[in-house]
């Protein structure tokens, strides 16, 4: 699957995306990313996930071929 990163995640990871071998629930993907990037746990815990331009819930089942957007909260000013 392809994970797209936005905002602070993109800045911290110095990458717009990465390819990840994964299939399973969004909640499991979140845990995988937190294990891979423990320094970003606070951000990843509150980030939203979208597939095909639609937000999906924690129980959404990923087959491994999707493009998944990982979107952290955005603050305005």
Image (cartoon, rainbow, N blue to C red):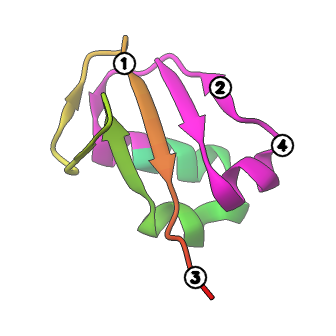
68 above or below 44?
above
3D distance between C-alphas at marks 2 and 4: 11 Å
Query: How would you rate the neighbour count of disc 3 (Cα within 10 Å): few for under 14, some for 14-19, many for 20 or more?
Result: few
Q: Nearer the viewer, residue 67 or 44?
A: 67
3D distance between C-alphas at marks 3 and 1: 30 Å
The quarter of the rendered structure image containing the C terminus is bottom right
Q: Are marks 3 and 2 in contact (CB under 8 Å)?
A: no
3D distance between C-alphas at marks 2 and 1: 12 Å
How far across and down, in percent of the image, does residue 2 sit?
Answer: 52, 21
Secondary element type, mark 2: strand
How far across and down, in percent of the image, does residue 39 sit?
Answer: 72, 63
Residue 51's quadrant in the figure?
Answer: top left
Which callout, 2 or 1, points at the residue further toward the start of the chain? 2
Q: Which residue is mark 3?
A: 76
66 above or below 31?
above
Question: Is 1 positioned to the left or the right of 42 in the image?
Answer: left
Which callout, 3 or 2, points at the residue further toward the start of the chain? 2
The label nearer to you, 3 versus 4, is 3
Q: Which residue is mark 1?
A: 66
Q: Are marks 1 and 4 in contact (CB under 8 Å)?
A: no
Residue at x 72%, y 48% (from the top left corner): 10
The label nearer to you, 3 versus 1, is 3
Query: How would you rate the neighbour count of disc 2 (Cα within 10 Å): few for under 14, some for 14-19, many for 20 or more?
Result: few
Secondary element type, mark 1: loop
Secondary element type, mark 3: loop
Q: Which residue is mark 4?
A: 14
């Amino acid at each position: 699957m392809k994970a797209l990163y936005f905002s602070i995640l993109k800045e911290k990871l110095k990458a717009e995306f990465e390819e990840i071998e994964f299939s399973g629930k969004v909640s499991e993907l979140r845990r995988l990313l937190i294990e891979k990037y423990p320094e970003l746990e606070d951000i990843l815990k509150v980030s939203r996930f979208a597939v095909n331009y639609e937000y999906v819930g924690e129980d959404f089942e990923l087959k491994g071929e999707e493009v998944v957007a990982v979107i952290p909260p955005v603050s305005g000013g």
